[in-house]
Image (spheres, grey):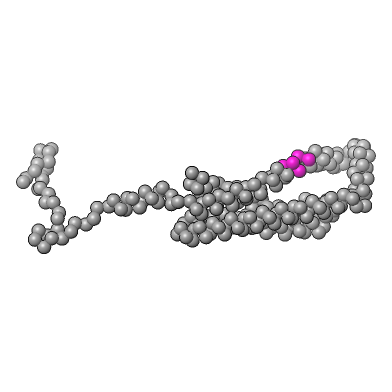
């Protein structure tokens, strides 16, 4: 039963992984060509920032390419189909291991940074933001720009935890989908022929054979009577 469901499950998992791949490439593009969006991360973690750009680009491209391998496997012979699915499962497993290794390295880098002098200076700077807001409110009496800056600061401080939670959930879901896709590919490689293919083979085997030729009576076709249409009815002429 699992082997029969595996191809369908693999197709749905690959659809979700394709969405992940597109999102990863879009994020990598923003990190590369719109660094102002992640200015704080770029300044605090320059090496990790560049590594994240490279990993997101490579990972996104892989997540877009591997589903095409699985899709191509569904339209070729059984032996080659199994080989492509095994390749898909192996590459997906390697990709998961690479992602886990990168996330572990990134977590260690962040933990090491938290013990540094730069982290202490950043904490002191964040404490000064409490004194900055009254100053912005006072300056907003003459121009609305300081009030807008204050709104942006407040919005960023409120959205940061929610964005972090969403990123964490999606980050945990990605390797789960990848492992599920690799397992489905292994099951699909061992799955029997689909019922549709078996039914088509059965239909082909049930096709009537051409009549055999007999030298005495010729081909064994049955002679059809002559008919004609008269007065709204079909009449057999004999």
Instruction: Name the residue rendered at 82%, 40% in the picture.
Output: 157
Answer left or right for 92 relative to 195: right
How many numbered badges does the structure rendering display? 0
Instruction: Answer whether residue 63 is visible to the viewer in this image.
Output: yes
Q: Is residue 189 above or below residue 170?
A: below
Nearest to the observer: residue 228 or residue 209: 209
Answer left or right for 86 relative to 48: left
Answer left or right for 199 relative to 31: left
Query: Residue 107 location, x and y as percent?
Result: 79, 51
Query: Residue 25 location, x and y as percent?
Result: 67, 55
Instruction: Name the residue rendered at 62%, 50% in the picture.
Output: 179
Q: Quadrant of residue 135?
A: top right
Q: Quadrant of residue 212?
A: bottom left
Instruction: Answer whether residue 143 is visible to the viewer in this image.
Output: no
Nearest to the observer: residue 135 or residue 57: 57
Q: Main secondary structure of the magenta part?
A: helix
Asked if the stretch drawn in magenta spans residue 164, the answer is yes
The segment highlighted magenta reads 161-166
Answer left or right for 111 relative to 101: right
In this view, the residue farthest toward the bottom is 215
Query: Residue 14 location, x and y as percent?
Result: 57, 50
Instruction: Name the residue rendered at 58%, 47% in the picture.
Output: 13
Asked if the stretch drawn in magenta spans residue 101, the answer is no
Q: Is residue 140 above or below residue 219?
A: above
Instruction: Name the residue rendered at 9%, 48% in the picture.
Output: 226
Query: Residue 70 location, x and y as percent?
Result: 54, 55
């Amino acid at each position: 039963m699992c082997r029969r469901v595996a191809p369908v499950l693999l197709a749905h998992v690959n659809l979700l992984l394709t969405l992940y791949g597109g999102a990863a490439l879009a994020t990598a593009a923003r990190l590369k060509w719109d660094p102002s969006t992640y200015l704080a991360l770029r300044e605090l973690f320059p090496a990790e920032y560049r590594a994240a750009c490279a990993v997101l680009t490579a990972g996104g491209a892989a997540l877009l390419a591997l589903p095409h391998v699985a899709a191509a496997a569904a339209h070729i012979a059984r032996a080659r189909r199994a080989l492509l699915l095994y390749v898909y499962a192996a590459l997906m497993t390697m990709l998961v291991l690479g992602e886990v290794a990168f996330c572990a390295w990134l977590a260690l880098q962040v933990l090491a940074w938290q013990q540094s002098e730069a982290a202490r200076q950043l904490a002191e700077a964040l404490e000064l933001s409490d004194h900055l807001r009254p100053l912005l409110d006072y300056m907003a009496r003459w121009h609305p720009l300081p009030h807008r800056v204050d709104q942006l600061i407040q919005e960023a401080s409120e959205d940061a935890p929610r964005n972090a939670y969403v990123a964490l959930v999606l980050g945990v879901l990605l390797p789960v989908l990848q492992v599920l896709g690799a397992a489905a590919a292994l099951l699909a490689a061992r799955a029997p022929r689909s019922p549709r293919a078996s039914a088509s083979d059965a239909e082909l085997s049930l096709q009537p054979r051409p009549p055999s030729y007999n030298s005495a009576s010729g081909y064994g076709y049955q002679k059809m009577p002559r008919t004609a249409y008269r007065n709204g009815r079909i009449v057999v002429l004999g």
